[in-house]
Image (cartoon, coloured by chain):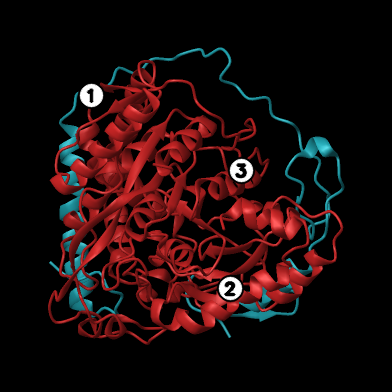
Chain colours: A cyan, B red
Amino acid sequence: MADFLWKELSEEEREQIRADAKKLILEFGDRIEQLPDREESFVEREGDRREEISERFCSSSESRPSTRNSSQNSPCKVDKKFREIMFENAPKKKGDFILGERGRWVE
Amino acid sequence: MNTLQKLKQIQEGKLTAEENIKRFLEKINKENKKINAVLSLNPNVIEDAKKIDTKKKKGRLAGLGIIVKSNICVQGLETNCASRTLENWKAPYDATVIEKIKEEDGVIIGMANMDEFACGGSGETSAFGVCQNPAAPGLIPGGSSSGPAASVAAGFCDLALGSDTGGSNRNPASHCGVVGVKPSYGLVSRYGLIDLSMSLDQIGPLCKDVDGAALLLDVIKGRDERDPTSFESKAIELKDEKKIIVGVLKIRGVDPKIQNLIDEKIKQVCNRFGQKTKEIKLKHIDLAIQTYYPIVYTEFFSGTRKFDGKRFGEKIEKSCGPEVLRRILGGGEISRAEYEGRYYKKALEIKEIIKKEFEKAFKEVDCIIIPTVPRLPHEIGSSISAKEMYSYDVLTTPANLAGICAVSVPAGKINGFASGDFAKNSSSRPPAQDSSQNRSNSLTKSQDIPVGLQILCPAFEESKMFSIAKRIKGI
């Protein structure tokens, strides 16, 4: 038993949470596994397919689709604020690049 | 004044958007320190309101103030999911729902508190302090959309946006005495929602009245090419439903006081409107929690791999609180190769069975009415096991598993005990807390605690759901 208030966790608390989480989720999983398996069958469905409208995106790498319905045929807008905020959020950057790499940061 | 009346006043020029927003800001400045429902304000909110006042033809949300749960991207605002992982992270774009709100001249007031990464059902797990319940001081406001519900209850906004994965809009709506909606899966685009569980999440409105919630949902819904799981749907229209058959479902473990209140409400509605009831049974509904959590744990583990602290934010495992860590570690466990995905696969199979059970039931009844929560909200900071916490979801998770629509409306109040020391429980963006600061010493006084009634309708029948909800709320 514990309260649910946010707190910083010690290593012991993390290990306890790991053990509790595993126990809980396996208990839930074992309970539902008791139900018999469903027979899988391939079903051809009429009327469940949705017509996909093809999107024409701008080829420029700076652009992104801003239209929600491409049938309106409005041109793609370039969102300068998007780029600005992405760079503001990044912990490491160099010129036009955000540095995000596996492993340790290389200076 | 209800939402539609206020909207009419703004559209007719009897009230300006600027006046409307300024009143909310005044209230927030005065009371949010105690309640902690709002984490940050839109710095341009007055400017945005003034722009709307200059328009001759205003949109459908003209000048209404909206508070947004902090897991829905609003460009330039801190969309931190109430977590240190994304502290100071500003959304680089608007979620589709936010674009639609802005197109219809809704005003974004600010970002609401919530359970961290939507992991919770109490409003206690935020890294930036507990959200209080304005309708029942000292008790949890519910979650994970604690801030949106509390903001509406406290009068900080006209409308709020939350997300509902297993009851996250409906649960706090019940505890705070407001209306909270979980739309049908696919009705509303999830583009720009920081996901908890992609096959269950839906963005939905909260409001003091049914008309306001219906209006906001009608604005934000619709097919979005950027969310391939979204569908087009007909306009939401409230009308006088002809005689309907109400399905009554008995689920074990509900507090008898709550069940009696709901049963009484159903009787009143049926007597007033000549409606019939029919008892229904749904196979495997008792396994809703055991089906829900393996799906959520697995999908949340998958969805959080991007929070590695490289391109933005902090590494989530190093910066999150206990409940988020529990879900990540549990999800990581059952995602391991040795389990071959069998729990997730099994949970999805049962999800499908539950969906078909509801489809069968809706051939015999027009709606199903049950309580929203199985017991009254507990005192903030109470010692409670994860299983007990998860059991709050027993009545709300079935609708998410089935993909149908559901709404919680206030049904009445039940007298219960709560801490008298409201001020002691309040906090606003504190550092890591000593949990004893938020726990009062004893249950000192009784108070009337709101209880919600939940209406479930078939998928994409939101009009019917709202019509029935309005009828019930009016009694």
Q: CA distance from mark 2 to mark 3?
A: 33 Å
Question: Which disc, if any, is residue A52?
Answer: none
Mark sitting on residue B227:
3
Q: Position of residue B39 (x, y in %)?
A: 50, 76
How far is disc 3 from disc 1 in space, using C-alphas?
A: 34 Å
- B67 horizontally vs B402: left or right: right
Residue B281: mark = 1
Q: Quadrant of the C terminus of chain A?
A: bottom right
Which residue type carries mark 1?
A: Lys
Amino acid type of the residue that numbered disc 3 sits on in the rendered structure = Asp
x 44%, y 39%: residue: B469
The amino acid sitting under disc 2 is Phe
The residue nearer to you, when weighing B412 against B202, is B412
Circle 3/circle 1 CB separation < 8 Å: no
Q: Determine whether A80 is above or below B228 in the image.
A: below
Q: Residue at x 17, y 54 (%)?
A: B387
Dot 1: within a 10 Å radius of its alpha carbon, few (fewer than 14), some, or many (20 or more) residues?
Answer: some
Q: Which mark is residue B24?
A: 2
Q: Position of residue B242 (x, y in %)?
A: 48, 21
User: Mark 1 belongs to which subunit?
Assistant: B
Identify the secondary structure beneath mark 3: loop
| Front label number (1 vs 2) | 2
Nearest-to-viewer mark from 3 and 1: 1
Subunit that carries the residue with mark 2: B
Disc with the residue nearer the chain's start (1 vs 2): 2
